[in-house]
Image: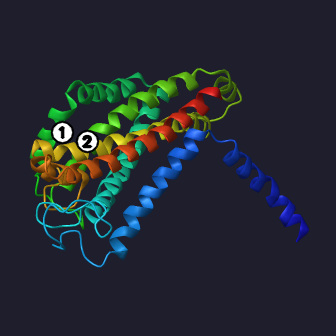
Amino acid sequence: MTTAVVGRRPWALGWLRGLIGAPASRIVGGSVFALIVLMCIFVPVFYPYGPEDFVAMALQPPSLEHPFGTDQVGRDVFLRTFAGGRVDLAAGVVVTVFALVVGTLLGTLAGSSRAGWIDSLIMRIVDAVLAFPLVILLLVLVVLIGPDTTWGPAPPGLPAAMIALMCVMWSGYARVARGQALALRDSDFVLATRVAGISSTRIVTRHIAPGVSRITLALAVSDIVMVVVILSSLPFLGAGVQPPAPEWGAIMYEGRAFLRQAWWITIFPGIVLALTGLSLSFVADSLLDSRRKK
């Protein structure tokens, strides 16, 4: 029994040292982001009505009963903001994870492969995707996929936007992963493993891929913000989630016509979106700084 406790102690102490020694930006950013996530999870659960219910007079200013006021038809903006956060954050995580996995695998394959045609084929596809302006390419893909495409519980417009982002975002990870894999492929410790007779597959999976994934994982944290911002901007271009579905961009899009007399409809969701972006940016920057120091 004593041996088991002692055996666990170094792991626990290491975790505690890592938490205490983490940069302040990571702690603050992670705490703010965790608070926003918890609000998005629990606010819609504990509210006695739904995000599309008419609960009060239209365009009521912020009050104790309705902290973010009401919108142009009497819906609670506080509830709609955090219900919309569920949509944006879930979509951001799904899109980023897909792009991270696909881009890292293809980039690692391109950078670590000794067959030049594999590298050339993958990187020409990457260059073709990155050559198009992002917004135009996204709009074209949304139209081709169909803006009314449904996907489980996702509101109409969201699946097309997510698929379009998945088709585009993997290319950035592939380029970063390829560059890192090329650097690791010619490093001394990898050359030593080749001399030792270790197979190429094991070299890639045990030595190159972990080094590549450390960089791409840190980038993925910041890319969640970019995905959320893009999804929130698409309603202003006639794509993405459309009103009356609760989503940060759709809420702000509806509130643009009432900005003078009911600023809270647009400002409060925008503040939550900005806090989400800043918090994740702090976490991503601290992770990248720690990788550079190593």
Q: Position of residue 128 (x, y in %)?
A: 24, 26
Q: Position of residue 48 (x, y in %)?
A: 30, 79
Residue occupying the point 11% across, 41% down: 237
Judge left or right: residue 223 versus residue 233: right
Q: Tell me the amino acid under the disc marked 2.
A: Ile
Q: In this rendering, does residue 114 appear at all?
A: no
Q: Secondary structure at mark 2?
A: helix
Give coordinates of residue 21: x percent, y percent.
69, 41
96 or 248, nearer to the observer: 248
Where, by quadrant of the figure, is residue 18 drawn? top right
Q: Earlier in the sequence, mark 2 or mark 1?
A: 1
Q: To which quarter of the image does residue 241 belong?
A: bottom left
Q: Across the whole image, how many numbered discs are drawn on residues?
A: 2
Question: Looking at the picture, does residue 217 appear above or below residue 94?
Answer: above
Is 286 situated left or right of 143 in this image?
right
Residue in the picture at 11% in, 50% down: 258
Which quadrant is home to the C terminus? top right
Dot in front, 2 or 1: 2
Q: Secondary structure at mark 1?
A: helix
Residue that numbered label 2 is attached to: 230
- CA separation, marks 2 and 1? 10 Å
User: Badge 2, how many Cα within 10 Å: few under 14, some, many 20+?
Assistant: some
Numbered circle sitting on residue 138: 1
Where is residue 289 drawn, in percent x and y? 57, 30
